[in-house]
Image (cartoon, coloured by chain):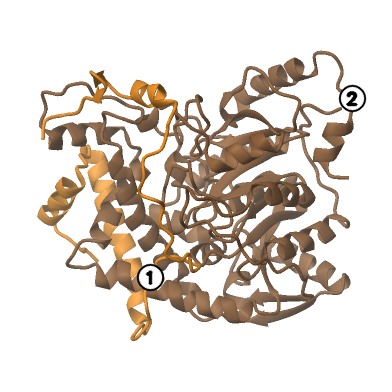
Chain colours: A brown, B orange
């Protein structure tokens, strides 16, 4: 039975919601999963919303000082569809500012890993993953541009699903990079993800890039292990992953090693495109609408605008600078256009590989890192950590991150990728895997 | 490798309307050089005759009707800005 059905069928004791919200607020002081928590809840299954997705009347900041105080006048389509399906909004979840980060650190109050607070929660949907790991009955609406669902889900030991690009409407999402952004779902079990996905997917007139997909549901027994993503990684990750492959083979899956052309170019192509798009999207935050307000209107626009942009964090500034450069007229062909062409080549190669199978890899080349370990990384070292999550994100392929073991108390996770519109098929494999795996959670707030 | 000198970097910051403190400036300048060198690895890919992929899936040419529609909560929008007689107040241009 899915936990959604279980929650709806179970009788709630008197004062259940108040007690649950109180307990959640207390733990949130330690873990920083939520930027805000609702005062009350309806009777539906609770759902949280990443803080870059608009909820009418609720402050929405994308964890940026630039958007402090911004109150949307409308619900994002995905939020409206959740409410229409009977779910109850529980709060907005923490994240890296505008989605810029893989470890959750680019936030004024970084989320902490629920298994051990010395460790990061992953990013950018850090809060969504923590919320899913601590709440017994809950699903999270998150968002991924280059790995922002897979990575935090992996670090916090939950299921993180990123659908085919266009499967879910982006209306009401605060854009990071329009051609890469995908709203997705986190939950404690794949069947809950599937249930939510089927309620919120589908074309939306308010998002012209949303599509009514022709989904492929057949589950292939062939799993491709790309050489470039399974070698030269942390020893514990490599040995844990090898054991997962053995177990899947025991379940009847046939695994094949393969080298995929251009996959090593995914990171530079992705960051070129992402930064170019981000630098234009962030230009709308000019200091007199959307959140932060500079009311010194005596300044000339250029100075006014420059002063307002002081409120961006360092990573946002770095991406604006690089993004503005790569799309400047003199080098546009060399960087931005080139990256778009490389994306085309990679889509073709991955499409060929995924015709009759799935790609499996770890989610990150490292184990869950501590805050101290991550602080030592340079910007480029940070970006290179996304080596496994970027290819499917760059190419808009559906993928799901799921835990498969625990190493010294922290989760190890893998990522399974399908061809376009193979969303249900990839979830189907994880559902099958779950019948052989016991999830571990440190907290079960709201348990009945 | 250094991809731009200080003068060019200052010009880029000015175009971006980004002001950096001295400590930020040194760090971002170093990152820009390092990241651009990494981006240059794309040069080795032969993309002759390849068309840019502006989207990862074919999204078609759907456009919304160019028509006004009712928006009942305009008050919330206006609360997000300083207003004067139903207009949003902005800086001088």
Distance (Cα) linking label 1 and label 2: 53 Å
- Identified at 67% across, 58% down, the residue is A400
Q: Is residue A287 left or right of residue A266?
A: left
- Label 1 environment density (alpha carbons within 10 Å; few <14, some 14–19, many ≥20): many
- Identified at 56% across, 54% down, the residue is A203
- Identified at 36% across, 40% down, the residue is B68
A121 lies above or below A354: above
A3, A371: nearer the viewer: A3
A225 lies above or below B83: below
Q: Is residue A309 left or right of residue B66?
A: left
Residue A352: give x, y in percent of width and height: 59, 81
Q: Which mark is residue A340?
A: 1
Task: Name the chain under label 2.
Answer: A
A278, A321: nearer the viewer: A278
According to the image, label 2 marks what residue? A11
Residue A45: give x, y in percent of width and height: 75, 33
């Amino acid at each position: 039975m899915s936990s959604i059905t279980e929650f709806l069928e179970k009788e709630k004791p008197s004062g259940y919601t108040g007690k649950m919200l109180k307990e959640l607020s207390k733990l949130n002081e330690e873990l920083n999963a939520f930027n805000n928590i609702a005062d009350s809840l309806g009777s539906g299954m609770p759902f949280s919303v990443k803080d870059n997705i608009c909820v009418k009347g609720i402050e929405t900041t994308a964890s940026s000082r630039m958007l402090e105080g911004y109150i949307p006048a409308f619900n994002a389509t995905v939020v409206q569809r959740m409410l229409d399906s009977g779910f109850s909004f529980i709060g907005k979840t923490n994240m890296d500012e505008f989605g810029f980060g893989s470890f959750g650190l680019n936030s004024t109050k970084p989320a902490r890993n629920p298994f051990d607070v010395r460790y990061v929660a992953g990013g950018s949907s850090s809060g969504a993953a923590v919320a899913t790991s601590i709440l017994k009955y809950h699903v999270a609406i998150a968002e991924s541009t280059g790995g922002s669902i897979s990575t935090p889900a992996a670090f916090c030991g939950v299921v993180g699903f990123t659908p085919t690009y266009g499967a879910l409407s982006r209306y009401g999402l605060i854009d990071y990079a329009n051609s890469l952004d995908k709203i997705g779902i986190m939950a404690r079990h794949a069947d809950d993800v599937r249930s939510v996905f089927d309620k919120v997917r589908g074309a939306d007139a308010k998002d012209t890039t949303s599509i009514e997909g022709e989904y492929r549901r057949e589950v292939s027994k062939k799993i491709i292990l790309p050489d470039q993503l399974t070698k030269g990684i942390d020893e514990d990750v490599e040995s844990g992953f090898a054991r997962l492959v053995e177990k899947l083979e025991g379940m009847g899956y046939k695994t094949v090693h393969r080298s995929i052309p251009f996959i090593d170019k995914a990171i530079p192509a992705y960051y070129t495109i992402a930064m170019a798009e981000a630098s234009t999207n962030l230009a709308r935050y000019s200091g007199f609408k959307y959140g932060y307000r500079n009311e010194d209107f005596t300044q000339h626009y250029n100075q006014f605008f420059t002063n307002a942009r002081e409120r961006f964090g360092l990573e946002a500034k770095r991406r604006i600078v690089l993004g503005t450069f790569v799309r400047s007229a003199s080098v546009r062909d060399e960087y931005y256009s080139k990256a778009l062409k490389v994306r085309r080549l990679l889509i073709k190669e991955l499409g060929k590989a995924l015709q009759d199978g799935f790609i499996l890899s770890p989610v990150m080349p490292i184990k869950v890192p501590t805050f101290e370990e991550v602080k030592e990384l340079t910007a480029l070292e940070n970006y290179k950590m996304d080596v496994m999550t970027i290819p499917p994100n760059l190419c808009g392929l559906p993928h799901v991150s799921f835990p498969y073991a625990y190493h010294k108390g922290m989760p190890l996770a893998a990522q399974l990728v399908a061809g376009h519109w193979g969303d249900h098929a990839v979830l189907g494999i994880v559902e099958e895997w779950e019948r052989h795996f016991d999830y571990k959670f440190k907290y079960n707030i709201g348990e009945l | 490798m250094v991809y731009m000198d200080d003068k060019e970097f200052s010009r880029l910051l000015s175009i971006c309307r980004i002001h950096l403190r001295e400590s930020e400036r040194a760090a971002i300048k170093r990152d820009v050089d390092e990241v651009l060198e990494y981006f240059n690895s794309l040069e080795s890919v032969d993309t002759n005759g390849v068309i840019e992929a502006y989207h990862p899936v074919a999204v078609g040419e759907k456009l919304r009707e160019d028509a006004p529609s009712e928006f009942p909560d305009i008050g919330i929008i206006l609360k997000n800005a300083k207003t004067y007689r139903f207009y949003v107040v902005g800086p001088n241009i």
